[in-house]
Amino acid sequence: MAKPAQPRAAAKAPPRKTAASSAQSRNTAAAPPQPNRERPNEPVRYKATKAEMLEFYRQMMLIRRFEEKAGQLYGLGLIGGFCHLYIGQEAVAVGLQSALEVGKDSVITGYRDHGHMLAYGIDPKVIMAELTGRAAGISRGKGGSMHMFSVEHRFYGGHGIVGAQVSLGTGLAFKHKYSGDGGVAMAYFGDGASNQGQVYESFNMAELWKLPIIFVIENNQYAMGTSVNRSSAEDQLYRRGESFRIPGIQVDGMDVLAVRGAAEEAVKWVRSGKGPVLLELKTYRYRGHSMSDPAKYRSRDEVQAVREKNDPIDHIVNELNAIGVGEDEIKKLEKEIRAIVTEAADFAEQSPEPEPGELYTDVLVGQY
Ligand SMILES: Cc1ncc(C[n+]2csc(CCOP(=O)(O)OP(=O)(O)O)c2C)c(N)n1
Ligand SMILES: [Mg+2]
């Protein structure tokens, strides 16, 4: 499902009605109002090949199993600090990032970041090693769950300050435009973050300077324990860019093919120099806000209903079944994924912690 933002009223005054035209309008249905400026095309569900669908399944399942393992390691005390899991939201990162070019386009997100890294092809071993605070981790074990970077992939974190990634992402887009490198930036943020002031300062600059950025609101319905309807005066978040003339599109974030379809149009629009676009992905997180959330603000039935009826991995499995991919092939892939995740966890557990001297590296002191 993809819905365009409400079109604005036409700028020009309507033509005066003549007797003939009023008679005609009584007989025919009114034409839908036309937007007064260009918009991205209405997205259509992506027509994936069998190989692409298998890859979507593989990536989403990798994120799911990786996150389950991270949850277990947290329970065993092997992961310290905060840990926010992405289970339920897999189709968003996989569908969107499959339309980007790794190493050319940049991605930035908040603290719920493991899935975005896996979707950008970053090695699960170094992500797990970072989670467990090991020297082999992608931030040398000093960032943990919320602060992971890979400049090589143009993945710029991992940010614990809600909303910060939106202004930083706008800066990344400025860099793409300034250097003319042809890349676009993708900045993810949550429904809660979408009420922050810096988001709108960023929207203004991004549209004014026609920066190549895709703003992505991952509307998982909750900001910690607060539901979107309780916190947001306008809960149709795809409309949030309207007053900055940023086109918005609402997307079913539980359907990877719908997500990829929306990504196609967004990337086409932004890469061609038409300025930013705002995507609202309707999704759901299955686990608590972080590992320490008892989730008392919603019922188990609510979560169970989404899992049973709207799970993004079940969706793609159904699609695969429909084109003749059998259970055996899918089970075989899942087994391979389990092995990758086990290998990542073993690697992390067996890796040494950083040397004490690392406390003094990567610190901005003196020269910068
Ligand atoms: C500036 C700031 N304010 C408050 C917090 C505390 N905080 C952490 S996560 C969060 C909720 C954000 O929810 P949302 O944007 O919907 O993202 P989600 O956790 O659902 O992915 C809050 C208020 C913070 N980290 N930074
Ligand atoms: Mg949220």
Image (tube, rainbow, N blue to C red):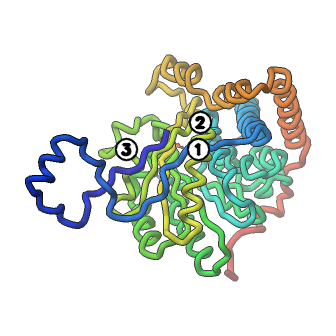
Q: Of tags 3 and 2, which is closer to the observer?
A: 2
Is 304 displayed left or right of 354 in the figure?
left
Name the mark on residue 321: none
Percent from the top left, x then y, of residue 20? 12, 53
Name the mark on residue 259: 1
Name the mark on residue 236: 3
Q: Residue at x 56, y 64 (%)?
A: 169
Q: Residue at x 32, y 56 (%)?
A: 34
Percent from the top left, x then y, of residue 163? 49, 56
Percent from the top left, x then y, of residue 363? 71, 69
Name the amino acid, label 2.
Asp
Q: Residue at x 78, y 44 (%)?
A: 132
10 Å neighbourhood of mark 3: few (<14), some, or many (≥20)? some
Quadrant in the rendering for residue 321: top right
Alpha carbon separation for disc pair 2 and 1: 6 Å
State whether residue 257 is above or below residue 279.
above
10 Å neighbourhood of mark 2: few (<14), some, or many (≥20)? many
Quadrant in the rendering for residue 289: top right
State whether residue 318 is above or below residue 158.
above
Quadrant in the rendering for residue 48: top right
